[in-house]
Amino acid sequence: MSNILSDITVKLNIETPSIPVNMGNLAIFVKGAKQNVETFGSYEDLQNAYGSNELLKQVANGYFSQDDHGNKLFVVTYTDVATAASAYYPEGWEFATVIPTDPTAPVTILPSSEEGKENAQASATDTTNAWADVVALSNFIDGKNERFAVVGMAATPENVEDAAEFKKKFGNSPRTIAFFSGATQAEAEYGIGGLIGAVGNETVGSVTWKFRRVGGVKPVDLTVTQIEKLHESNIFTYVTKAGLDQTSEGKTLGGEFVDALHGDDWVKASLETRLQQLLSNAKKITYDDAGIAQIDATVTAVLTDATNNGIISINPETNAGQFTVKTASRAQSSNEDIAQRNYNGLQFSYTRSGAIHTVKVNGQINI
């Protein structure tokens, strides 16, 4: 991935109309005097180090309370959140959240006119700054076009009413997950950790983020209309359906399904890892049909695994994954690429498998 020492560059271009790394690890960003990163494998270890930070402990408790949580939890202390995120990007976290400096502050939207901005600036500065780092991390991850920022607020009627304003602060962020749960911000922070711990480390492609159970999170006391209001802003929550507690949706603020993007991240990370291993472990990958065939086979193997995991759709006629891999021969490569030992002749595409989230049944009664 970006900012990691590698000889492989994988670019994914997504057409909307249509485990090498641990993909469930969470990073918690917390404001501090200097930048640092620590890793923890249990809640007890983190509690000993950060016993006085209640909100951080809530996220960690939610994360480690889930049966299938990732094998690491990162705590990133930052002075500037984007700088820290860039510095510690190679650590391997897939999800990240920021502990807001003042979690009780509303997410204020300043007026669009210059005059309005001036009039509102003084009163809004404190509340805007309280969430500024949260938004900054979201923007950083959007810029990378991989991984996820996770944000949350208490699922109170007041926050539901302000859902559209909350989303507006982050824009249509394709990489930000907004999960409203609990009656207080502390409970909401537990919900963030619980959500990632419960779902993030499942085999990527095997689960959708809707219908998931999160241990320790209580279903919200909201009406159907209020829940629909959250969904209109691509915010989801925790509900009871047919007697089962579960997440109400599974989208990012931009309207993309989390499992689809997570699957894309898995494909990218897997290709980078396995191709790097191919180059590093072989004595030499020759710039000819034999060497190019090894690259083709490696990419095909990754996409086949992605099909088996549920990331890529299956062709009903062939029972194989709906993907293609194309390679250019040495003769089709430029003299400059051959001289510089750069192979730019591989292309692939695939169709996401998707998932069924609603079912409509038409029945008939005969008398």
Image (tube, helix red, strand yellow):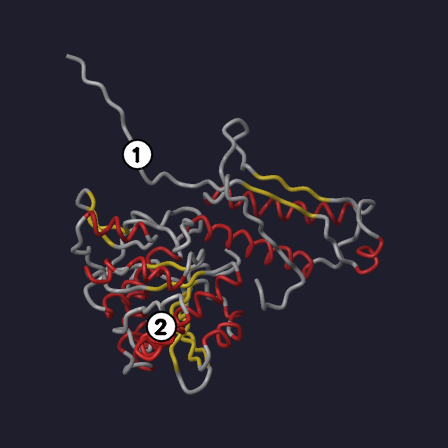
Q: Based on the displayed image, in which of its 4 quarters is residue 62 positioned?
A: bottom left
The dot on residue 359 is 1
Q: Earlier in the sequence, mark 2 or mark 1?
A: 2
- Please provide percent x and percent y for residue 338: 82, 55
Q: Secondary structure at mark 1?
A: loop
Residue named by callout 2: 131
The dot on residue 148 is none
* Residue at (36% x, 38% y) in the render: 356
Residue sitting at the far top = 367
* Residue at (27% x, 61% y) in the render: 162
169 vs 261, nearest the viewer: 169
Q: Based on the displayed image, in which of its 4 quarters is residue 293 positioned?
A: top right
Q: Is residue 215 above or below residue 41?
A: above
294 vs 250, nearest the viewer: 250
- Please provide percent x and percent y for residue 99: 34, 73
- Please provide percent x and percent y for residue 204: 44, 51
- Please provide percent x and percent y for residue 193: 32, 65
312 vs 128, nearest the viewer: 128
- Disc 1 crowd rating (10 Å Cα; few below 14, some 14-19, many 20+) is few
Residue type beneath disc 1: Val
Residue sitting at the far front = 115
- The answer to whether 238 appears left or right of 146 in the picture is left
Q: Secondary structure at mark 2?
A: helix
Measured Cα–Cα span from mark 2 to mark 1: 38 Å
Residue type beneath disc 2: Trp
- The answer to whether 141 appears left or right of 220 in the picture is right
Label total for image: 2
- The answer to whether 236 appears left or right of 175 in the picture is left
Q: Is residue 231 above or below residue 315?
A: below
* Residue at (35% x, 64% y) in the render: 151
